[in-house]
Amino acid sequence: MSRVTRFFLAAAFLAGASVPAAALDGNADAGKKVFAKCQVCHTIGDTKRTIGPNLNDVIGRTAGTQAEFLAKGAGGYSKAMIAAGKAGQVWTPEEIAIYVADPKKKIPGNKMIFPGLKNPQDAADVVAYVATFSKTQ
């Protein structure tokens, strides 16, 4: 059972929800489709865009430290994202799932205007897709 699945099962248990374990496994193919919402600002793989940081190798990365995006200075990371990194925020699959569900709640004051993926399966699928572009999983 993946760490993402364990996370969502624990969250569902704590919330009193009844969610089948199979429904919470992330599917990278489905995540690629959901990631289209993220591609407005973020890149992954060989593509390049300038709005948000590239998400290659994001798993295991400290928040606010992607070199090319950090080099943008005031146009790059928010002070809140840099502070989160300095406080020890590392992007694990579980942390990414929490963040993409509600970015403003996870890191208040961040620049990301995306409201979040409210469907836990979409979040799990995006994490599974992003993981295919990370050496550390």
Image (tube, helix red, strand yellow):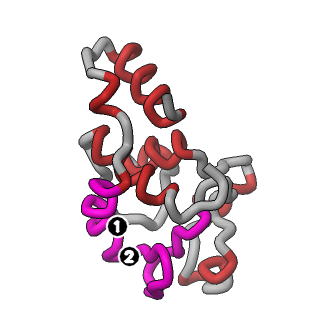
Q: Nearer the viewer, residue 14 or 73?
A: 14
What residue lies at 49% left-to-right and 76% top-to-bottom?
Answer: 45
Q: Quadrant of residue 80?
A: bottom right
Answer whether labels 2 and 1 touch (C-beta < 8 Å): yes
Judging from the image, what secondary structure is the residue with disc 2 in? loop
Is residue 26 visible to us here? yes
Q: Is residue 133 above or below residue 91?
A: below
Q: Amino acid at mark 1?
A: Cys
- Residue 95: horizontal and vertical position, in percent? 54, 43
Q: Quadrant of residue 83?
A: bottom right
What residue lies at 31% left-to-right and 38% top-to-bottom?
Answer: 120
- Residue 124: horizontal and vertical position, in percent? 38, 43
Residue 38 circle label = 1
What residue lies at 49% left-to-right and 51% top-to-bottom?
Answer: 108
- Residue 43: horizontal and vertical position, in percent? 44, 76
Q: CA distance from mark 2 to mark 1?
A: 6 Å
Q: Is residue 63 above or below residue 55?
A: above
What residue lies at 43% left-to-right and 81% top-to-bottom?
Answer: 51
Q: Quadrant of residue 62?
A: bottom right
Give the number of marks.
Answer: 2
- Residue 31: horizontal and vertical position, in percent? 33, 56
Q: Is residue 92 left or right of residue 27?
A: right
Q: Nearer the viewer, residue 41 or 25?
A: 25
Residue carrying label 2 = 41
The local crowd at label 1, few if under 14, some if 14 to 19, many if 20 or more residues have their Cα within 10 Å, is some
Magenta-tinted stretch: 29-57
Q: Amino acid at mark 2?
A: Cys
Assess whether residue 31 is covered by the magenta stretch: yes
Judging from the image, what secondary structure is the residue with disc 1 in? helix
The local crowd at label 2, few if under 14, some if 14 to 19, many if 20 or more residues have their Cα within 10 Å, is some
